[in-house]
């Protein structure tokens, strides 16, 4: 027997008004979003010294340095301070993608601070003029470290945290800075976790072919045919370029403008190679929105795209689209807006942050990496010391000083340092530019077989491989020991 229509309507209204909101409320309570779980960071500005090393310059001026802070888990006055040494970008980007620190803070009762690096994000010492010459000259590793040392010291005083040990954290260049902080300011920093920190290769140590060889290895490990397909596509592109079939190249790669010079072809080669670099670095087991949007396992997705294409050229175009056209909204690729060639062959990014990193790559950070089509799958693209010097002199009016980072921050002669964790993932092309073996009981290398670029610093995820779960556990235990020893020493 059918129910009367009015009764049906009544039941529907009751469910809509009373039942559904209750179910939604319960669902939200049971499975809060990552946004709900995120710590309550407050954005603040610190009055920072412009030039720490010259008392007569710039009238002892200051600038506003941005930092993020949360005391959500802090045992006030007693818990440690976890300090992220900001690197080449907006500090919010790093805070949103470095959840391990806040997870660890909740366990160890720590205050968390993310400090923005001078000349990046909103921490521009001279505003829109920051990248003029000579204003840009205050962008150095030494000035950045001094910024962090001063900030830590004054904030500890302000917060009544003078006896709280400080552990610094950083990923990539930020990891390098964490190493340098422990070396340069051991009186301020108790220990450092340096994730994916290429402190050797950026100091001019090692093989210039290593980086792109390791990018290639990531794709080759998935399937050797993937490397062959990419290499074959680049060879076809090179043949078209030699024939000056520029219209054919434009059509094959959906370029907005027809290339017309060898310079345009070089730019295209750089843009294509950069996409593979990004996918290798960010080969996480879940989709991410860090340095762009990436699907889960982008190397796997890239290889499947390369191997399932109708022809190699269109397959290569679609593969780099994973990086440059993740939304699918681009109808063509603009060679000079999607990728900017600079003094870092692995890419400087875009916008003001790219200017800052380019300047650093022209001064202290050495990255004369090359691809050669023999040890890697990319076209031969050299970047020698002479090319670097020529470019940097023209762009910034500076002459690089090879060897300075090694002199200033010890290079591979770290034996007398202490309390540093060097973590690296086997999937990360930067890994072999860092420390892969423990150097002493307190200079500890942690290798993560299934880890991409500083995966261990990211927040816990159900798709995390066992190797990164174990790495974080080991890191947590080591840091707890450092904190306990420092507390005991200061009591």
Image: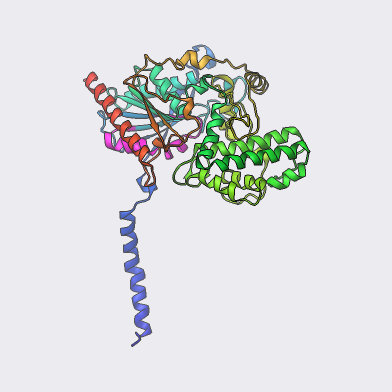
Magenta residue check for 92: yes
At a point 25% along the width and 28% down the height, the residue shown is: 78
Q: Residue furthest front?
A: 224
Q: Is residue 156 left or right of residue 95?
A: left
The residue stretch that appears in magenta: 84-111
Q: In the figure, residue 189 lies in which quadrant?
A: top left
Q: In the figure, residue 85 lies in which quadrant?
A: top left
Q: Front-most of 103 and 470?
A: 470
Whether residue 343 is visible to the viewer of this picture, yes or no, is yes
Which image quarter holds the C terminus? top left
Question: Residue 339 placed where, x, y %?
Answer: 62, 37
At a point 48% along the width and 34% down the height, the residue shown is: 428
At a point 28% along the width and 34% down the height, the residue shown is: 74
Magenta residue check for 120: no
Q: In the figure, residue 132 lies in which quadrant?
A: top right
Q: Front-most of 174 and 249?
A: 249
At a point 38% along the width and 42% down the height, the residue shown is: 465
Image height of 243 relative to 123, above or below: below
């Amino acid at each position: 027997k059918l129910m009367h229509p009015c009764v049906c309507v009544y039941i529907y209204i009751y469910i809509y008004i009373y039942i559904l909101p209750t179910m939604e409320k319960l669902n939200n309570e049971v499975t809060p979003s990552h946004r709900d779980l995120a710590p309550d960071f407050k954005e603040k500005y610190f009055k920072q010294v412009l030039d720490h090393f010259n008392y007569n310059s710039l009238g002892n001026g200051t600038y506003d340095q941005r930092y993020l802070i949360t005391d959500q888990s802090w045992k006030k006055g007693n818990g440690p301070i976890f300090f992220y040494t900001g690197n080449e970008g907006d500090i919010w980007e790093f805070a949103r993608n470095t959840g391990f620190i806040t997870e660890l803070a909740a366990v160890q009762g720590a205050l968390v601070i993310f400090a923005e690096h001078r000349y990046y994000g909103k921490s521009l010492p001279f505003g829109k003029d920051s990248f003029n010459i000579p204003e840009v000259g205050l962008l150095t590793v030494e000035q950045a470290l001094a910024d962090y040392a001063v900030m830590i010291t004054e904030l500890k005083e302000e917060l009544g945290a003078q006896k709280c040990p400080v552990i610094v954290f950083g990923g990539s260049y930020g990891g390098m800075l964490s190493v340098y902080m422990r070396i340069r300011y051991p009186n301020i920093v108790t220990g450092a976790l340096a994730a994916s920190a290429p402190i050797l290769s950026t100091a001019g140590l090692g093989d210039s072919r290593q980086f792109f060889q390791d990018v290639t290895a990531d794709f080759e490990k998935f399937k050797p045919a993937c490397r062959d397909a990419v290499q074959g596509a680049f060879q076809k592109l090179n043949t078209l370029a030699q024939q000056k079939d520029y219209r054919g190249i434009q059509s094959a790669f959906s370029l907005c403008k027809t290339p017309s010079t060898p310079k345009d072809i070089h730019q295209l080669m750089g843009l294509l190679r950069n996409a593979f670099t990004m996918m290798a670095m960010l080969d996480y087991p879940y989709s991410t929105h860090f340095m762009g949007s990436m699907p889960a396992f982008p190397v796997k997705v890239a290889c499947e795209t390369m191997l399932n294409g109708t022809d190699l050229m269109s397959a290569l175009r679609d593969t780099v689209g994973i990086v440059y056209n993740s939304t699918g909204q681009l109808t063509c690729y603009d060679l000079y807006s999607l990728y900017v060639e600079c003094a870092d062959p692995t890419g400087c990014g875009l916008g003001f942050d790219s200017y800052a990193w380019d300047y650093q790559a022209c001064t202290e950070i050495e990255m004369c990496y090359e691809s050669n089509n023999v040890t890697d799958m990319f076209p031969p693209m050299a970047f020698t010391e002479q090319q670097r010097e020529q470019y940097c002199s023209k762009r910034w009016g500076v002459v690089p000083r090879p060897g300075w980072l090694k002199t200033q921050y010890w290079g591979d002669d770290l034996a007398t340092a202490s309390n540093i964790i060097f973590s690296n993932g086997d999937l990360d092309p930067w890994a072999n530019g860092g420390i892969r073996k423990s150097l002493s009981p307190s200079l500890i290398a942690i290798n993560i077989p299934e880890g991409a670029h500083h995966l261990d610093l990211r927040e816990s995820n159900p798709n995390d491989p066992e190797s990164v779960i174990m790495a974080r556990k080991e890191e947590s235990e080591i840091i707890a020991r450092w904190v306990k020893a420092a507390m005991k020493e200061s009591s």
